[in-house]
Structure formats: structure tokens, C-alpha cells
Image (cartoon, rainbow, N blue to C red):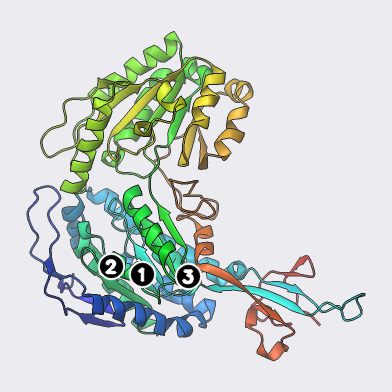
């Protein structure tokens, strides 16, 4: 593993102009790690954004195949990071080695998946309407549309996925695939990890001849505002808290030139347990659900934070079984002291509410998170009480009991936007509660049946998004190949000669891509 320098990455060079030094810590002990990181100055933020802007016209005009080679090279460099790298990530995050190894594979897999998208060419969205000179009363001009990258993108990585949602994570991968240079703001919780991954990206950029400034990275607290407000930045990706995401959204909207923000923020991911499923396999559901709640110490954006069932003796028994399962779960170390502090505050808010009762879990103390189970009165959902709408990031969940089918629908109507919702159901349940699917479509980005939301497959069909406050823009996803759409915009050419058109729109279709030609999908060349 290479030496940790702690300098910012700007236009292919390293820079340490500032005087403020920041440090990573050992997530398990709180011990300061022996690496100095130089917080970026305002001048360095400016330079990083300008470096990305200078790279943009070169990078976006590279062939899709060339950009694909770059992404594949990044994937190769990530896969080559060895056991010492994994150990360092574990030390910064307290996540186990198996989890980090799996996440490294997911991160490189994302890069290779977007490389396939680029080679496939459908991201261009090519549309051609040929001229109709004889049309009456007015002729139609020749019109041709394709999509290009928006421009330099600022990316703020997540704490809970130090690889897959961080430096070379999904936002970076999709932005680079779209033809957008990136300025990445390194997460304070794993700066040494960020440096090693940034080095891998830079090595890949140099090997494949990418322009300097295609990837930049800055360290430090308080530098995000300057980055979001910089006129060279034309879009932003963010994964984090509702408070932080909303602040960045407001800054971006208040710019002289507002920019789109794709922020993943807060979700409680309701799990709805229906009667026939409960009768058939209530005990196993309790065990599976408890395992999902505590997986990764509950530090997943898709952690099931709300469990809803219909009042019955079977549901009462289920709650007892779930309570026993939660009581049996061991405490775990969280990503950092800040995350643990936020978890403790979230628990305190639940415990202080008159409409919420504590069912299971030992008192939160010490330096590890203890799993908890609460029960809330259904009126809190029906009345839109904020305490049930706000994510408690950690190994806890809240049970809500509804009196009947009508109240279940009413309670779900009271939910804010979510990343996921889960139905635990038998075929008879789906027939009896058929209205739930249409209702949940309005509330969430992904609806699961008889599974648990903490697994997010990286593939073409995945949606990791949803209505506000789950995300700032429900039209996109931060996982899966559709994520590239966030950083593309359409451009139309009218009456352009074939020789001056981009390759995706030329008559001969030299890229061999599928295009919509006069309303018909076709890969053929045009005469």
C-alpha cells in the first residue's frame, strides 16, 4: 500500500496549501490515526472546480468506448488493492473484513457495469426525425437528438459505505460514465480509505490517457459550501443526512445558476406484515426481521425502521418473538463516535415521546450501539408525527399496530417518501390487500415482496431512490445503470449536415446503436 500523503487532488497534481490539519480515527478505539490531511483552502476548491471544468470539453468528447476503458481500468485498480488496504478500511470504519471485501467487489462491479452501458450506447437516447420538405402547410426540418454529460459534478460520499457510496462509488461511476469530470469531497470518517481509492482512480486515468482534472478530491470540513456554490459545478450527488442534504439543496437552488442536486437522505423503509404470512411463518419472520434490523449495526439507508401489522393475537405473539430476538442481539461498534452520538439522540427522542413504548433492548451506554425495539401508537402515523418520519440511523425499529385494513391504508397514506417498502405476504394476502401495491408505488422507489430491504442489487433494473425526503429528486436512482440519467441532458440538432453531426446521429450509424428513427426503433444505417 502506498504512503498516505494527505494532500488534495487537483488537476492531476497534489496540493497542500492550507494550514488546517484534519485526521481520521480508529473507529473502535477513537485513537487518532497517524496521517495528516490538509483541509482544502477556498483557493484549492476553486482550482479543483476549474480543473474539472477544463477537463470537461475534452472528456465528454471522448468516445464512449474510451471512457469505458477508463472505468474498466478503475475497476482493475480497485480489485488490485490488497489485504493491507482492507485492514485500513476496517480500522477507519469498524466494518468487518468480509464486508469490505464484498463492497470492494461491488464498487469495481459498478464501474464495469457502467462500462457496459457505454459500450451498449443506449445512454445516448438517440432520436432522429428526418426532414419532411413536402409536408403541408409547413415542412418539417431534420431534427436529431442525443444526450451529453451535464458538466463537472460535485460528489459527497456516504459514511456507511466507504467504497460503494464513496470516492469511486455509484455517483462517481455514473458521472464519469456520463462524460462528467468529478470533484469529490472526501468523507471525514474514512480519509485514508478515500486517498487509496483516489490514487487508484488517478492511476487508471493516467494509464488510459484521460485529461488531467477528470477526477479531483478535496479534504476537510466546511469546504462543501464553496464547492456547491462554485459556478463551474453543474450538478451534485450526495448521500447523507436529511439536514445535510437539505442544506446543500437550498444552496444549489439559491445560486445565480441553480443546479440539480441528487441527494439520498432519510428513509424508514416500512415492513408490512400481512395476516396469512404471519399465521404461516410468524416465528421465522421475527428472526429474519431482527437479523435485517441489526445487519451492519443498522447502518444501511434501507434499514427496516418501521414494522406495521394488523391487531390480532398472532401479531401480539409476533411482537413478543421479535422482542426476544432483539434482546438476543449483541451490541456492535458503529462507524464513528458521531454516528453513535446521533443514534443515542434518536433513541432518546423515541423514549421521550408519550406515544411510544420501549419493548426490547438494554440501555444504550458505552461505545457500542445496542439494538432496540419500540412500539408506537398508530395515531402518530395517522397524524403525521415527525418522530416516526425521521430515520434513527442504527440497529432499531418501531412496531405499529393498526386495527384493520382501512386503517392500514390510512397509516400508509401518512408516510413520507421512502427508498423501500416491504410486504410480507402470502398469495391470499396479496388478493385481500390488493390496494397496497398502488398505494406504495406513490410512496417508495422499490417495493419488496417476502424479502428484506437491506440488500441492494447493482443491476439495470434496480431503483435506489424515492419521493422526498428519501431523495431530493424521485426521478432518479443512485444504484443501477439508470443512475447515469441524472448527469445527462438532451441536445437537439436541426438541419445539420451529416458530416458535422456527432457519431450517434450520423446517417451511417457508425456506433451501431439502437436509435428511434421516425418513430421506429432501428439499428440500421439511413440512406
User: Which of disc 2 and disc 1 is earlier in sequence?
Assistant: 2
Q: Secondary structure at mark 1?
A: helix
User: Where is residue 256 shown, x and y percent of the image?
Assistant: 44, 71
Q: Quadrant of the N terminus?
A: bottom left
Circle 3 Cα neighbour tier, 10 Å, few/some/many (<14 / 14–19 / ≥20): many
- The mark found on residue 177 in the picture is 3
User: Where is residue 379 shown, x and y percent of the image?
Assistant: 42, 21
Residue nearest the viewer, comparing 326 with 154: 154
Task: Report if the CB atoms under discs 1 and 2 are less than 8 Å apart.
Answer: no
Q: Which residue is mark 1?
A: 229
Residue most toward the top?
Answer: 313
Q: Which residue is mark 2?
A: 197
Circle 2 Cα neighbour tier, 10 Å, few/some/many (<14 / 14–19 / ≥20): many
* Residue at image point 47% right, 27% down: 272
Circle 1 Cα neighbour tier, 10 Å, few/some/many (<14 / 14–19 / ≥20): many
* Residue at image point 42% right, 71% down: 72
Residue nearest the viewer, comparing 289 with 136: 136
Name the quadrant containing residue 155. bottom left
From this viewpoint, is residue 111 visible? Answer: no
Amino acid at each position: 500500500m502506498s504512503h498516505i500523503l494527505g494532500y488534495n487532488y487537483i488537476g492531476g497534481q497534489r496540493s497542500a496549501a492550507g494550514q488546517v490539519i484534519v485526521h481520521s480515527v480508529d473507529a473502535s478505539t477513537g485513537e487518532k490515526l497517524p496521517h495528516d490531511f490538509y483541509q482544502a483552502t477556498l483557493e484549492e476548491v476553486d482550482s479543483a472546480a476549474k480543473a474539472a471544468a477544463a477537463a470537461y470539453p475534452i472528456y465528454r468528447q471522448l468516445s464512449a468506448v474510451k471512457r469505458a476503458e477508463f472505468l474498466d481500468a478503475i475497476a482493475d485498480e480497485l480489485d488490485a488493492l490488497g489485504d493491507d488496504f482492507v485492514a485500513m478500511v476496517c480500522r477507519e470504519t469498524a466494518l468487518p473484513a468480509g464486508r469490505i471485501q464484498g463492497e470492494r467487489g461491488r464498487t469495481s462491479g459498478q464501474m464495469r457495469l457502467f462500462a457496459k452501458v457505454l459500450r451498449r450506447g443506449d445512454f445516448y437516447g438517440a432520436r432522429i426525425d428526418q426532414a419532411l420538405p413536402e409536408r403541408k402547410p409547413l415542412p418539417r426540418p431534420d431534427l436529431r437528438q442525443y444526450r451529453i454529460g451535464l458538466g463537472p459534478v460535485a460528489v459527497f460520499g456516504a459514511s456507511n459505505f466507504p467504497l460503494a457510496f464513496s470516492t469511486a462509488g455509484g455517483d462517481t461511476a455514473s458521472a464519469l460514465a456520463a462524460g462528467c469530470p468529478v470533484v469529490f469531497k472526501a468523507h471525514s470518517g474514512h480519509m485514508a480509505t478515500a486517498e487509496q481509492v483516489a490514487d487508484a482512480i488517478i492511476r487508471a486515468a493516467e494509464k488510459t490517457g484521460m485529461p488531467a482534472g477528470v477526477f479531483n478530491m478535496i479534504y476537510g470540513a466546511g469546504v462543501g459550501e464553496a464547492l456547491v456554490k462554485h459556478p463551474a459545478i453543474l450538478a451534485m450527488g450526495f448521500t447523507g443526512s436529511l439536514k445535510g442534504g437539505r442544506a446543500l439543496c437550498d444552496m444549489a437552488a439559491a445560486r445565480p445558476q441553480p443546479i440539480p442536486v441528487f441527494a439520498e437522505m432519510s428513509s424508514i423503509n416500512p415492513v408490512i406484515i400481512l395476516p396469512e404470512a404471519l399465521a404461516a411463518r410468524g416465528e421465522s419472520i421475527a428472526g429474519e426481521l431482527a437479523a435485517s434490523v441489526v445487519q451492519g449495526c443498522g447502518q444501511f439507508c434501507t434499514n427496516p425502521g418501521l414494522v406495521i401489522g394488523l391487531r390480532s393475537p398472532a401479531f401480539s405473539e409476533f411482537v413478543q418473538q421479535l422482542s426476544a430476538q432483539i434482546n438476543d442481539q449483541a451490541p456492535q461498534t458503529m462507524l464513528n463516535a458521531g454516528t453513535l452520538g446521533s443514534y443515542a439522540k434518536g433513541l432518546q427522542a423515541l423514549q421521550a415521546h408519550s406515544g411510544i413504548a420501549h419493548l426490547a433492548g438494554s440501555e444504550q451506554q458505552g461505545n457500542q450501539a445496542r439494538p432496540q425495539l419500540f412500539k408506537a401508537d398508530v395515531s402518530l402515523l395517522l397524524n403525521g408525527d415527525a418522530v416516526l418520519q425521521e430515520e434513527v440511523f442504527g440497529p432499531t425499529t418501531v412496531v405499529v399496530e393498526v386495527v384493520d385494513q382501512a386503517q392500514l391504508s390510512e397509516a400508509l397514506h401518512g408516510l413520507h417518501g421512502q427508498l423501500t417498502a416491504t410486504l410480507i405476504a402470502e398469495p391470499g394476502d396479496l388478493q385481500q390487500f390488493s390496494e397496497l401495491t398502488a398505494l406504495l408505488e406513490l410512496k417508495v422507489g422499490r417495493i419488496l415482496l417476502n424479502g428484506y430491504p437491506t440488500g441492494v442489487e447493482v443491476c439495470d433494473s434496480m431503483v435506489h431512490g424515492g419521493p422526498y425526503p428519501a431523495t431530493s429528486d424521485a426521478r432518479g436512482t443512485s444504484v443501477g445503470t439508470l443512475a447515469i440519467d441524472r448527469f445527462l441532458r438532451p441536445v437537439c440538432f436541426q438541419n445539420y449536415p451529416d458530416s458535422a453531426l456527432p457519431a450517434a446521429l450520423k446517417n451511417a450509424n457508425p456506433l451501431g446503436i439502437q436509435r428511434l428513427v421516425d418513430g421506429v426503433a432501428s439499428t440500421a444505417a439511413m440512406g
